[in-house]
Image: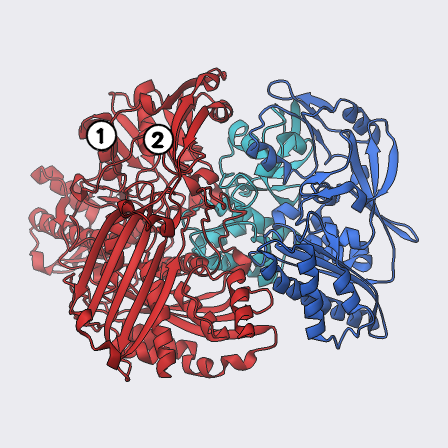
Amino acid sequence: MCGKGGGTVNFFIPKNLEELADALKEKDENTYLCAGGTDLVIHLRAKKKFHYSLIDLTHLEEMKKIQETEDRIMIGAGVTMTELEKSPVIRKYIPALAKAASMVGSTQIRNRATVGGNAANASQSSDTTPVLFAYGAEAVVFNEKGEKKICLLDDIIEGLEKNLLKDREIILQFVIKKENALSGFSKVGSRKAVTISKINGCIKATVREGKMQNVIVYLGAVGAKASKAPYIEKALEGQWLEGIHKKELKDAVYEQIENNIPSRASKHYKKSAAFGVIDDILGELRELAGEVEM
Amino acid sequence: MLLSCTVNGEKIEKEIDPAKRLLDFLRDDMGLTGVKEGCSEGECGACTVILDNQAVTSCTVYAGQVMDREILTIEGLEKNGELDILQKAFIENGAIQCGFCTPGMILSCRALLMEKPNPTREEIKRAIEGNLCRCTGYEKIIKAVECAVKGEVQ
Amino acid sequence: MKELKYVGKRLIREDVYDKARGKTQYTCDRKLEGMLYAKLVLSEKALAEISINTDKAEQVPGICAVYTHKDVPKTKYNPHNWTPGVGAPEDMYILSEKARYVGDHLALVVGETKEAVEEAASLVEIVYREETPVIGLKAARENKENIAFEKESRCGDFGSLPLENLIVEETAGSTQAIHHAPIEPHIALSAIDETGNLVVWTPCQTVFMVRYHICSLLDVPYTKVRVVKAVMGGSFGGKGLSVVEPACAFASWTLKRPVMLYMDRPADITATRRRNPSEMTVKTAVDKDGKILGRFIACDFDGGAYYTNASAIAMAFSKKLFRLYRIENQTIEARTFYTNTTPGGSCRGYGSPQAHAVTEVNLDQIADRLGMDPCELRLKNVVLPGDDDPAGGTNLGDARIRECILKGMEEFHWKEKRAHIREKNTDRYAYGVGMACATHGNGYKGGYPELTNVYAQLHPDGSAEFRIAVHDQGCGTVMTMQQIGAEALHMDPYKIKVYEADTFLSPYDSAGTQASRVTYVCGRAVQEAGEALLEKIKNAAAAVYGWEKNRIEAEDGMLKYPGTDREECRTYGEVSKEYEKKFSRYLHADIEYEPDSNPGVYCAAFAEVKVDKYTGQTEVLDLLAVHDVGQCMNYTLSEGQIEGGAQMSLGQALFEEIGYDGKGNVKSRNFSKYHMINAPDMPKVRSLFIEEHNTDGPYGAKSLGEVVAVAPGPAVANAVNFAIGSRFASYPITPEKVVLWLENKEKE
């Protein structure tokens, strides 16, 4: 379906992949993909753009599903934050993603903002990206020829609001391997809620008999995009979830931030705040571990 | 483009510019001026409407995106001249001062009650976290929702 | 005192029925036949000579005009002067000839649709020849020419105190630029009426001020301009000065068409007015018992790019500092500087939020040094009922700050919490309680022309109307006036209509809805008009029915008279009808009112906070505000003021700030960057009232709407300082500042 707007613009409402491919074929530099619209509408107004074409992605059922196979979870790029937060599958297998989604914007924004948009916009303070990276999420990328390819999400996000998708490419869905791991997410912004992350983070770990193993830590808003935090991973690997040595962990967190943003004035604050974020997440992991044992 | 959707229970078909915001479509094309614009970037919640049973900021949605969808604005809450229980509760509890945030605020709360008829205080706060109000300090709004939930409305 | 029937009751205001249904027409909701839209084009540079090319903008289909400085009258005004008598320097044009701040009004685009206007506004080409701007007070102080106003206020002689023998505590602090943040952005609608008058509908605080500005700028007589106060989606002082009205009126007058001039949020933040930032040092000398012997305060205000309220902010600030504690020797040196940032203007509390922000922290530091409880220290020094203002201001009246503190201590369990709160501390979280006091005024008596007029009528259908130039900003002013009128007239408040301000309909009022004068001054005027009208109704009944006047009782819209066999009753409406028929008279009262006094209002606020030592975030867990109000008008409305005022004051303490970079660019141009407190961060606010009914206000009432926005902030600052041992007196107390302070402490 397609309609003419005021002036010369096109407005595509593809309802299946075939229609999406057709719409992508006509996509030029003045055409924008619009999922929830929570960033795009504001962005185009701020840039004083008045005449442009749009491809609406909210009527594409293919992109709105969360599916589960024996060893994988597939999350449609058009799944909203609210849907992620509430999905039993996500809460069970990727608890940090449910948590991250629950902390994006406001209720109204979470009802519209999509996981695909959040990743593809490549903001350095994106809340879902650290989690997707921590789980090694892959993206299924679709193009105007109807072709699909799979790539590591990390490889197509450049950061600072840039992605490496080609002009007529779009992320259809994310694929994440099921793991027997716990995970948590936390963030610090200016307020408790409805706030852009000054720092956020995700920890994923397998907890065996109270000890953390295979610890993966990603931090956001301390670099162009979310990045791995090896110092923190090292400090946590093999540690008891219940008896973490705070001083050592704090040193590791501080070292990590120093390493990430050595020349930024905000590093002093972010070191301490990151320690708060890590402390929060460990609290979450303890709760989850408790639930698992029960 | 010819937009067809449901607005306040009524099926409509209208020739519109799909690239205008849902906010502008509702206010200018439909005359539903209860939808208010306070920040134009989804931060203040004054333009909140209910889209397919969920609260959304209509300033961040394109009109064309509501094709075949259902929209509820403040004007659609009243049924046969009878105010919605939330509207009554807001009135009775002093939850309305200047009133500019009120339509969005009530709709955020309505969306909450559609999903959770018995929300906790924390859930109410979360439902209106995206609705800014400079007048009330939110307390009487929360109280109004609690009264509506408990049926303590005249 | 006599029991009140309508005043002090939780009556529901009438405007909320339509507001709850989305039916209320705010200015933005109106559409007039042939109406054009208009938008200001704002400067993107803080200081620059400009040349503007409007060719491209004019070519956008639907554009009717693009105005710049060369098109507007070459008359300057000061949007702060609410009557010609205020007389502050005039330095602003409708559209500026030079860019003096980021947001300065440089052009006006007028067109048939908003879409056209938006597009054209983006196509106005401005060439800036930039000069070095003055951003912030530090830069402003480098050049004496930047001083817009300075004044020393004093009582006694601070200089003669033997400071070396006293305990002297000095505190340096600052307050930030605050956006008023009404959810309705600035807007005005203007049109030419059927007889050629210029009509302006605006959500403003003073219609007579807007009329004055428009008439002087457009050179039109007062009698030809009708300014109507529109339904207002909040102001908080932001709509207190003229902002968009002159440009809107100019366009409409020039094009002879209706024009709606609207603003968006970034314009509202950058290009209207703001709370003046301040930097000050406070030096207080006490004896070992905690008696304050003297205080010296030096305060600098950032006045922004135009004069506006440069003198008023400095004087309003200074005045309050003589009216809370008994200080025999006090000197206040206040200065206001020009900078290349948004001009200052009225903002809820006018000077009080700055005045108390640092002085109240200073007092806690003294208490700390003396090992004395902060409440005890204040109790030793607060003013008492009947005290004079040592600086020559009006008498403080029935000042009940002592009672506010005592009642608050009891309700808050102050002593117990202060002694034990820190026992809740963990490695990560620190807890604290703190309190602060505040005072504010009740109008302009003693400073500026202070009078109002009321015209009241009683109609044959039994309804009454009061014409008085009040402007309901959303607080429920109209309801309050209805309650006062009802009490005076002994009739149903819902049968009373209070018309809001309209220069064609309202009798003159000298100062508008500002300065906390409405309940105290206008309310008392309504009471007196109501009483006078009731007298006339009784006189009329005496004349019509041959009753003895002093035996007539009034109740619920009826006159009752003990007749020979049974009580006779007549409704006010019947009396009105008969009176007109028999005597050719209509029932009305017309009064001019000037108050005799301008007492202080007082508040003590108590806060409990939890400080996250890792993230630096402060959560306010509990807030209690005790207000000396004389007499509460309507508890629901009063609590609404206190809860809303707390939201603003806590915002000042912890979150809000219009930030500028070195070039004067505004960093927080929208609500995603300018952080108002939302529901999850707002504590439950408990309100208590001290009601001694002993003032010249209506039924013993005093003001409330501004003082509510003063004490919670410093109470939180004191609580944070108590929790972590810091000495914050610079607002907002951001997480970054908390973390930095903790880290420095650790290093020591």
- Identify the image quadrant of the C terminus of chain A: bottom right
Q: Which chain is blue?
A: A
Location of residue A278 with respect to C146 vertically, above or below: below
- Which residue is under mark 2? C98
Q: Is residue B115 left or right of residue C250?
A: right
Coordinates of residue C568 in the picture (x, y in percent): 16, 55
Work out how far the residue at label 2 is from the one at label 1, CA to CA, in angstroms: 24 Å
Nearer to me, C522 or C217? C217
The residue carrying pointer 1 sits among few (fewer than 14), some (14 to 19) or many (20 or more) residues within 10 Å by Cα, namely some
Q: Which chain is red?
A: C
Q: What tint does the image give chain B? A: cyan
- The residue positioned 40% from the left and 24% from the top of the image is C51
Coordinates of residue C469 in the picture (x, y in percent): 24, 43
Q: Is residue B64 left or right of residue C626?
A: right
Question: Which residue is farthest right?
Answer: A70
* Disc number placed over residue C215 in the picture, else none: 1
